[in-house]
Image (cartoon, rainbow, N blue to C red):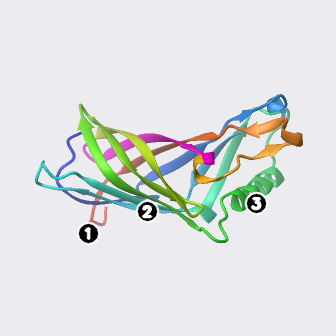
Amino acid sequence: MAVAAGEYEIGQQVGRLLVRTARQGVAARVGHDLLIEATEWEGHVTVPADPATQPTVSVRVDLRALKVLEGTGGVKPLSDGDKRQIQQTMDKLLQTDRHRYATFTSTGVEVHDGRATIEGDLALVGQTRPLRLEVRQRDDVTVAGTASVVQSRWGIKPYSGFFGALRLRDAVDVEFTTGLRAVGSTG
């Protein structure tokens, strides 16, 4: 990756942060794979001029601002009522009444051939665990990346319904694309 040295802002104004869930179990066909967007998130990236110093990344996501965009699969389309119910279930599972924000803070960055592996700590539902982001540079000011969040590592019991016959896969996929807006710029 060849991002110029400087300080950058990231977030919903210049990017998207999406979460994809998948269903499993004997009744999986009645459920939906979900696409959820974090509509309120912000972050800061520092790329030092000294190549011996590692870049840093920090991100904060408002978990109360997660929005179900779509549900695929299932025996019937996802209704607005279904989306409201899913929102209530997410709030309960993520304990948003006590832990409104998820945060990520980098602890190490390894850059190689237009890609970076960012190791860091994800704080979620009051617990902090290591998380790895895989990031690639799309152009001079845009990066995209992925991570897999295994809910049970943070003490979250994945959703289940129909007496356990329908379950949410423990790992949810996080993907993001964001512009790198220089701190102090308006564009």
Q: Could you tell me residue 75's position as x and y percent?
A: 85, 32
Q: Nearer the viewer, residue 15 or 90?
A: 90
Label 2: which secondary element: strand
**Does label 2 or label 3 sit earlier along the sequence?**
2
The residue sitting at 65% across, 66% down in the picture is 96
Q: CA distance from mark 1 to mark 2?
A: 15 Å
**Does label 3 or label 1 sit earlier along the sequence?**
3
Q: Could you tell me residue 170's position as x and y percent?
A: 65, 40
Q: Could you tell me residue 149's position as x and y percent?
A: 55, 44
* Disc 3 target residue: 88
The residue sitting at 66% across, 48% down in the picture is 69
Give the position of the C terminus as an image quadrant. bottom left
Label 1: which secondary element: loop
The residue sitting at 24% across, 44% down in the picture is 140
* Disc 1 target residue: 184
Looking at the image, residue 122 lies above or below residue 184:
above
Q: Is residue 101 left or right of residue 184?
A: right
Mark seen at residue 70: none
Q: CA distance from mark 2 to mark 3?
A: 23 Å
Mark seen at residue 42: 2
Dividing the picture into quadrants, the one containing residue 5 is bottom left
Three-letter amino acid code of the residue under disc 3: Gln
Three-letter amino acid code of the residue under disc 1: Gly
Give the position of the N terminus as an image quadrant. top left
The residue sitting at 83% across, 28% down in the picture is 26
| Magenta highlight range | 140-152
Dividing the picture into quadrants, the one containing residue 160 is top right
**Does label 1 or label 2 sit earlier along the sequence?**
2
